Image (cartoon, rainbow, N blue to C red):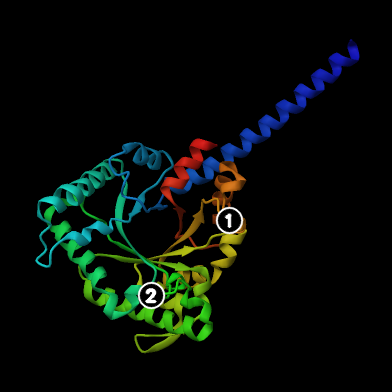
Amino acid sequence: MMKGTVNLCVKRLLLTGVLMLFVMRFIAVEECLGQRRGSDMRFGVWWWSVDNLADLSYLDFAKEQGITEIYLNQHHLSVVNPNGIFGPIGTAEVVIPTKEFIEEASARGIAVYLLLSNTGSWLYEEYRQHFHHIMTGFLAYQQLVHEDARFAGLHFNVEPNQLEKDCGTRFWTEGYATQSRLMQQLIDFAVMATDEYGKFTTIDWATGFWWQNFTVDYRGEEMPLHQALILESDTTFVMSFRNTAEGMVEVARDHLDFAQEVGKDIFLGANIASTEGLEIDQFYHLGRAHLDEQLALIYSLHPYEHIHLVIHEISRWRHWQMER
């Protein structure tokens, strides 16, 4: 009996010690994230679906996580007519839901940016009409609503590596020459967007960490693509999809170093997904505690003070949280 009692006490002490270590570790992570969030830290989330705008539980979740900005894929702004008028259906189905969503976000201290997402077709002038339709809708919308319901700016996510041929295969598979041409078209498109619409709002760009492998002609000067996009953007977002802080910082190091050199804000992206075979890019299978711990560690791995974080993306994040 005495031996059993001693063993039970030892087990309880060990369990208590483990729990204390876990709690101390959790508190340290939360304090680190809290200090950043309480200062000048920006914390963003990509918001791909507009089907959940009326479900305020998503906004409440974002607020609880410390989100300060949302990148909303409201591509339906393209329903505006060429004269900048939405009409009854566009007003009811696009303008009003968007207005109410941004007002609710603003009430929670969250800014909303218009996410402009495309696989690369916009790089060709003959397929660019859809982009300009969205921009006509954006400008019309901004004029229709009051300040608390306006978009805070534009957020571009154009990925030429996803552009497909008619047969379904990607141009990217053709090799470096085709990839380089697409990336030159990308920076040319970015310059056009800034020159045409930059006078109305801020313009941010999302980049892939692998884009640093390409050199482009940027406003008459040869330089790496990632440097050109950082210069062209108000803020740059790196899709630094790795499942550790060290991995995220390492793949984005060239971006971070150049952003620090020119004094631009820069975000590192964390991917929450469950795609089989891409576990190295994702946090899903590792759990929420690991995610929080790794995000907190990022600030100790690079000296730049204007590094921020962005999560991909709201639906997966919230559902993952509920599952866990």
Dot 1: element? helix
The answer to whether residue 113 is above or below residue 58 is below
Dot 2: element? helix
Looking at the picture, which amino acid does disc 1 mark? Ser
Identify the residue at horizontal 25%, vertical 77% (top origin). 195
How far apart are labels 2 and 1 at the CA level?
25 Å
Q: Can you identify the residue that label 1 sits on?
A: 300
The answer to whether residue 310 is above or below residue 129 is above
Marks 2, 1: nearer the viewer? 2
In percent of width and height, residue 305 lies at 47, 60
Query: Does residue 198 appear anywhere in the picture?
Result: no
Looking at the picture, which amino acid does disc 2 mark? Leu
In percent of width and height, residue 290 lies at 60, 45
Q: Would residue 176 be found to the left or right of residue 185 on screen?
A: right
Q: Are marks 2 and 1 in contact (CB under 8 Å)?
A: no
The answer to whether residue 306 is above or below residue 285 is below
Identify the residue at horizontal 34%, vertical 77% (top origin). 123
In percent of width and height, residue 280 lies at 62, 58
Q: Can you identify the residue that label 2 sits on?
A: 231
Query: Does residue 316 appear anywhere in the picture?
Result: yes
In percent of width and height, residue 138 lies at 20, 61
- The answer to which image quadrant residue 276 occupies is bottom right
Question: Of residues 283 and 41, which is closer to you in this image?
Answer: 283
